[in-house]
Structure formats: C-alpha cells, structure tokens
C-alpha cells in the first residue's frame, strides 16, 4: 500500500473519536435494505467533479463507483492512492479499526463534511457500502451534490440472499440477464439461481452433446393464454447460451459479488433433453420439446446410459460454474414410466429399494456422489426428501415450509422459498387488473412479512437455514419488461427480509422508503409494478335497489383517487373520489391514484352493466361453495362481470348443486331477455351448465317457463348467454343453471364432480 494512503488511514482513529457529537436516530433516506444501525451526524459532504476516490485504481469497486457517479451525474472522478489536505475524498478501505468486528459482507459507512469512508474486511463489504452510498445520492443533476453526514454499521443476517430466474419457459437475452444481476446487486443479494433446463427448453451449451441445443433448445410452438385453456401457437421458439456467454455472465456476477448457481433438472422436467436424445427415456420413443406448461411423464430413466450422460453434462457445468452448490432440481417427477419400465424395476429389485420413491432417492444419491467427487455439493427442491435425503444435500423448501423444517431437523442446510411468500410469478395486485399470471396472490406486504426461520426449529436447528430466495417462473412472462414488473418491487421487500432488518409490524416505514426508491427505478427506466398504489373497486347494493354504488379504495392512501367516465381523460384534474359513486346506467369507469399531481398507479378500468335486475334482491335455493362465494348472492346482480381467465374472484362456484336464483324486480316490469355469464375452464374442472332455463312470475308463487338454452347453444356463445323471449310482465324472475355433473372420460378430473361457475345476471 502506498505510504500516503497508509498515513491517511492512520488518521481514522481521530475521525471515529469525532463521532461523539453525532445524534442517534434513523433517517428518511430511501435505503433498501435498511441498515442495521444508522446515526445521523451534523453537516453535509459535497460531491462535485473535484472529488477523488481514494483506492487502488485496479479495484473493480472503485471503478464501479466511478462509473455509476459518471452515469448519473456526469462527474468523471479520479481514482488515486494520494490526496491533498482538505480535498473532498471518498475512501474505499479494507483497513478495519481494531475496535470493530466485521465479517466479509459487513461494512461501515461514515460521511463527514469532506470525507466519506467505506470500510470493510472484504471487497464484498466495500461493494455493499457503495450500494448504500448510491441510494443516498439525490436524483437531480447539479454542479455539486449534498450528502447528509451519517454513520452506518451494517451486516447481513443470512448467507443465502437470492433470486431465481427461469429462462426455459421463455428465453431472455444475455444483456437482460446482466441487467437482472444488476438489480440483485443493488439490493445486496448474493445468489443468482439460474434455471437452465426444463421440458420446454434446454438453454446451456454442452460441447459433448450438441443436440441438446440443436434440438432441445427449440420448441415448435408455445402455449397461449392460461394453461387450462390448452391453446397453442405453431411458432418455433427458443434460444440458448453458449459456454462463452455463460463465462461472461458468471464473471459479470462475480464482480458484483453474486454467486451463480446453475440448475440442471433431473430426473423429471427432462423432456427437452429426451427430445434430443430419446434413448435417455424409459420408452426410447421420439418426442417433441414440450409446448405447454405443466408436468410430463417422460423423465430420465435411471440406467447406466443416463447416468453417463448426466455425469458428462455436470462435468461441463462444474467447469463453468465455480459455485459451491449445483442445483439438480428433483421436483415434480412422475413415476408413471418408471412403474411400467423393466429396467427401472430391475434397478429397484437389484438395490433393494422399496418403491419408485426409493428409486428417485437412489437417483439423487448417485448424482450427489458424483457431484461430491468433483468437490461440489447438490441442492434440490424439497421433493428430494422423498425416499430419504442424500447424505450431503441441501434442500430448497418450496411446497410450504415443512420440507425446510424436516431437512433442518436432519441437520441439512436449507434455503427457504415457499410458494406462499417467495413465488414472484403470482399476482401482486387485483388479478383482473394485472398481466396474466399463473395464479396465487403475493403482494409486496406479504413478501415483507416473511420470516425465513420457522418457529418450529430450535436455536441449534435454525443454524441450518441458509436464507431465502424469490422464484420467478416464466410460463406467463415472455419479455424483459414483464420480468421487471413481476420481480420489482417484491425483490426489494425480500432483500430487506434476508438482510435481516425487516419489521413486519412497521411495514409502513418500508413502504415510505420504497415509494422514494421508486424515483430511482423511474430514472433507471425499470418497468416495476405500482400495485401498492392500486385502486380497487367494490360494488355496493343500495338500500333502494336502484343501480349500484361503486366504492374506490387504495391500500396505500384513498385520499388522492381520481376517476373519469367513458371517453373522458383521466388526470389529477378529474373528479376526486370522496363517497361511493352512484351508477344508474351502463358505463365504463377509469380510476387511478395520484401523488403531487402525478399518476402513480396503473389506470384501472371497470365496466359496470346496469339492467332491471341490477341491485335487486336475489335469493338462492342452494348456497355456493365456501371456496367460491365472494360477495354472496348479490354479486350476481352487482353490475360487475367476472373475468374469464382470472376466475377466483367475482364468480360464484357450485359443485353438485345447480344454480337456482329468484330475482325480485320490486314491481311488475315488461321484460324480454335475460343475460347470464357462465364459465368453462376444463383444466380446473369448471364446465358450462348442461342447460339454462328462465321462468317468470308476477306474484312469486306460480312461475312460467319463458325460454332456455341447451349445452351446445351455451358452448356456441362461449358462456356469454343471452336468452330472448316474448315480452312478459313479471316481478319475479327465476333462472336455473343445471350443473354439468360428473366429468366425462377424456377430460381432466374424469369421474369427479364438475364445477359450475356463474356470474352476472342481467334482465331487460
């Protein structure tokens, strides 16, 4: 180290002594994750073009800080190992005061009037200190930048702070993967779990097996809409990363102190590999790379040829990836082919295995032994617990927390990633206002509330919880902008959880910091979700039964909601929401949340359909299922149509029972049609009604049938049913939708009771 720099660092003891005048307390700075300890001091540091970075010029961290400041502010700072007295300086130092104990990811950030110190025991600590400093900088460009004096002592709680990205269902270019890594770096995450192989595509070049990318990286079509619709296009789709691409991305991540953990799926989710090399399956039959999403029966056959193939593949993977762990999947492996395969049954018998679950455990153990022989360890999804856990395996607990608890009690390391809190392919706002997703509901607040260490574990068992990660599966995410939308800001919430400074009881504090942080994401051009501002609508049935009242709410703040109708322009000058809005005719309402005159939420659009039945009293002969009963019977006459894809809200669901509803129009009316909305979603066992019938009555006792449709007619109009009839005088209208009964052979759930889903009923 140059003498000048040594002399400068020797003066640190006097600097720390001066901190006795500091005022303790948190700041309003938008720091995410929140540091462990923040002390506010007097004064400001002025950053301008004359400021120097005191560090080794070859240091990546110094060069990174220099490039970020130049990008955001245009200051091209010098990096030097010398300085002039009283010069504005940012010091990056691995020298640690004797009184401070750091691990290599810890750092100390000190800002005074003319000096900034970032001190750490490792370069990763220096890098994290830089991330904190960058978040402290104002967003506006000026000739000089004021940074408040502050003292931060910080260190993470968990060793594994990760994010996952599936590039198999949809492929993302190398440059975007770098950008995704940058997002992890910004939030001090240190693990990138890269899901590289699956049924729908093999994305990593393997020199010894070129067909894996020649054939396995491409599929002859993709699923359209939700998987339950079973619709496909016929467009060739795919892509892969060369080994040079992978080396470049690993190096890029390593500079940012991020470990890349590759996932090579086995023994299931192997259809792309089998499409390239059919001999790896139990049947040897030629198959295609999967077009659809889900779980498929064709899996790796546990025979010597397969293990030779996998060992060759993993050998190339291990040479590329320096990570301690290699992820081998292990999830969702159907045993259908194994049960019918003579080779599989021979392996079971030869090795004294109990059954096919034991065969899966044998498969994982054999792969683990090979990976261990290369000096690495395996990690897999919690299904690898089935049949007995391999000796040195780590577990990723995704089907809840039970797998993690079981593994930790067996003294195996665990990464917690339960679907309930860590699956970022779930909706984060009202599903009907969100891009199409796989399902589920995981808003930012729920992510922030997650605690990775289960309360069921003792203190000694808790030490086996390495940390947590967010998973981003991409069945319904087909471009980088959508990845950003689903990942952010939930990634920020998880980052604070795994850093160990989250406080679910004080979520509003995090939310305030997050909203300030949105300004930075805006400046970066990130397509993040604004669902925390989301405006939600709710139809209220008025006591007089005339039309509806529509309420608007935002979980963030309901005092700055503005709305407009039909073709009116929505802006901060539009009507301000105060009380529920009376709707007496069919209309389209648009609403959004505004802050300081700027629209913060996405615009929600709500169609309201008003008919003679809207808002009227309705009674049901049979109650809907508790699982699908949101809003009760009145939801059938509230003017709001259910979404045909995102079907878990607004609809009433009936199983076994028919819908039999009577609507009281309050007085005798002339009516001539009834419209009713029903749903078909056969993948989820939801089928159209066998038939729909309409009856009318003036006194509510004797009803006369006036019209109806059979199944083929309902199917022909895709569930949006209109039943016209001759003009009738009626006060009471009865509608019966006949449940489809048992599901026929050839359909999912064959032999089980089908669901009948009904929504709005409109009488005119």
Image (cartoon, helix red, strand yellow):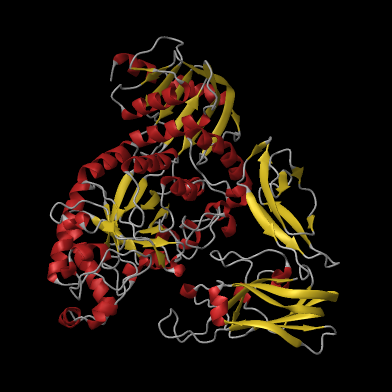
The spot of residue 247 in percent (x, y) is 23, 42
Q: Residue furthest bottom?
A: 702
Res. 606 in view: yes
Q: Is residue 612 above or below residue 497?
A: below
Q: Is residue 351 above or below residue 327?
A: below
Where residue 724 appears, as percent x and y from the top left, is 69, 76
Q: Nearer the viewer, residue 606 or 107?
A: 606
The percent position of residue 748, horizontal first and vertical second, equals: 43, 78
Residue closest to the eye, 320 or 568: 568
| Count of marks, rendered view | 0
User: In this orientation, does residue 122 appear?
Assistant: no
Q: Is residue 38 left or right of residue 660?
A: left
Counting from the top left corner in percent of width and height, residue 587 is at 72, 56
From the viewer's perspective, is 512 left or right of 245?
Answer: right
Q: Nearer the viewer, residue 376 or 236?
A: 236
- Residue at the far top in the pictured view: 85
Quarter of the image for residue 628 reads bottom right
Query: Which quadrant would the N terminus be assigned to in this image?
Result: top left
Q: Which corner quadrant holds the C terminus?
A: bottom right
Determine the residue positioned at 76% across, 44% down. Answer: 576
Q: Residue furthest front?
A: 726
Compared with 318, 664 (above or below) is: below
């Amino acid at each position: 180290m140059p003498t000048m720099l040594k002399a400068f660092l020797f003066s640190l003891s006097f600097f720390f002594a001066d901190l006795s005048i500091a005022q303790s307390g948190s700041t309003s700075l938008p720091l995410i994750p929140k540091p462990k300890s923040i002390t506010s001091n007097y004064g400001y540091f002025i950053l301008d073009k004359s400021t120097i970075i005191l560090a080794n010029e070859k240091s990546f961290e110094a060069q990174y800080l220099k490039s970020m400041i130049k990008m955001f502010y245009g200051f091209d700072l010098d990096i030097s190992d010398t300085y002039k007295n009283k010069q504005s300086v940012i010091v990056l130092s691995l020298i640690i005061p004797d009184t401070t104990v750091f691990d290599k990811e810890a750092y100390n950030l000190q800002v005074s009037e003319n000096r900034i110190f970032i001190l750490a025991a490792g370069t990763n600590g220096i890098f994290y200190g830089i991330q904190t400093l960058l978040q402290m900088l104002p967003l506006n460009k000026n000739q000089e930048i004021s940074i408040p004096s502050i003292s931060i002592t910080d260190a993470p709680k968990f060793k594994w702070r990760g994010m996952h990205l599936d590039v198999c269902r949809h492929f993302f270019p190398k440059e975007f993967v770098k950008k995704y890594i940058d997002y992890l770096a910004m939030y001090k995450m240190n693990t990138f779990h890269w899901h590289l192989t699956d049924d729908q595509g093999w994305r990593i070049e393997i020199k010894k097996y070129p067909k894996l990318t020649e054939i396995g990286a491409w599929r002859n079509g993709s699923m359209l809409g939700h998987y339950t619709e079973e619709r496909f296009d016929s467009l060739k789709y795919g892509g892969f990363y060369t080994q040079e691409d992978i080396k470049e991305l690993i190096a890029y991540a390593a500079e940012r102190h991020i470990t890349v953990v590759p996932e090579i799926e086995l023994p299931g989710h192997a259809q792309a590999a089998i499409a390239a090399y059919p001999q790896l399956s139990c049947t040897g039959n030629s198959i295609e790379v999967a077009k659809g999403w889900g779980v498929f029966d064709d899996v790796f056959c546990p025979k010597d040829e397969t293990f030779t193939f996998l060992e060759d593949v993993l050998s190339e993977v291990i040479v590329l990836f320096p990570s301690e762990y290699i992820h081998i999947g292990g999830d969702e492996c159907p045993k259908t082919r194994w049960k019918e395969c003579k080779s599989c049954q021979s392996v079971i018998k030869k090795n004294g295995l109990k059954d096919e679950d034991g065969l899966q455990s044998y498969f994982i153990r054999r792969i683990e032994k090979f990976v261990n022989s290369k000096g690495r360890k395996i990690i897999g999804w919690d299904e690898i617990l089935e049949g007995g856990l391999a000796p040195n395996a780590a577990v990723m607990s995704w089907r809840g927390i039970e797998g993690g608890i079981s593994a930790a009690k067996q003294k195996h390391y665990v990464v917690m990633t339960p679907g309930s809190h860590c699956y970022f392919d779930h909706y984060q706002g009202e599903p009907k206002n969100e891009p199409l997703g796989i399902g589920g509901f995981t808003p930012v607040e729920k992510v922030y509330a997650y605690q990775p260490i289960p309360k069921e574990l003792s203190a000694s068992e808790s030490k086996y919880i390495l940390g947590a990660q967010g998973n981003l599966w991409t069945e319904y995410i087909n471009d980088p902008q959508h990845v950003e939308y689903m990942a952010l800001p939930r990634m920020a919430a998880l980052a604070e959880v795994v850093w160990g400074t989250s406080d679910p009881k004080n979520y509003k504090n995090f939310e305030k910091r997050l909203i300030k942080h949105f300004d930075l994401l805006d400046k970066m051009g990130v397509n993040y979700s604004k669902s925390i501002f989301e405006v939600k609508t709710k139809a209220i049935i008025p006591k007089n039964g005339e039309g509806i009242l529509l309420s608007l709410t935002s979980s963030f703040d309901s005092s700055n909601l503005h709305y407009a109708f039909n073709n009116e322009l929505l802006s901060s000058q539009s009507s301000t929401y105060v009380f529920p809005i009376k709707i007496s005719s069919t209309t389209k309402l648009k609403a959004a949340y505004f802050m300081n005159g700027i629209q913060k939420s996405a615009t929600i659009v709500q169609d309201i359909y008003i008919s003679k039945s809207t808002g009227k009293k309705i009674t049901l002969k049979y109650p809907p299922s508790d699982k699908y009963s949101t809003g009760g019977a009145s939801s059938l006459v509230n003017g709001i149509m259910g979404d045909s894809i995102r079907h878990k809200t607004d609809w009433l669901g009936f199983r076994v029972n028919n819908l039999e509803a009577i609507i009281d129009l309050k007085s005798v009316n002339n009516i001539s049609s009834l419209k009713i909305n029903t749903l078909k979603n056969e993948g989820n066992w939801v089928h159209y009604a066998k038939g729909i019938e309409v009856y009318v009555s003036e006194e509510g006792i004797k009803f006369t049938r006036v019209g109806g449709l059979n199944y083929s007619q309902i199917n022909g109009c895709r569930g949006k049913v209109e039943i016209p009839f001759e003009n009738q005088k009626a006060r009471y209208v009865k509608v019966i939708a006949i449940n489809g009964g048992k599901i026929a052979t050839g359909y999912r759930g064959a032999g089980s009771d089908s669901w009948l889903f009904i929504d709005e009923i409109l009488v005119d």
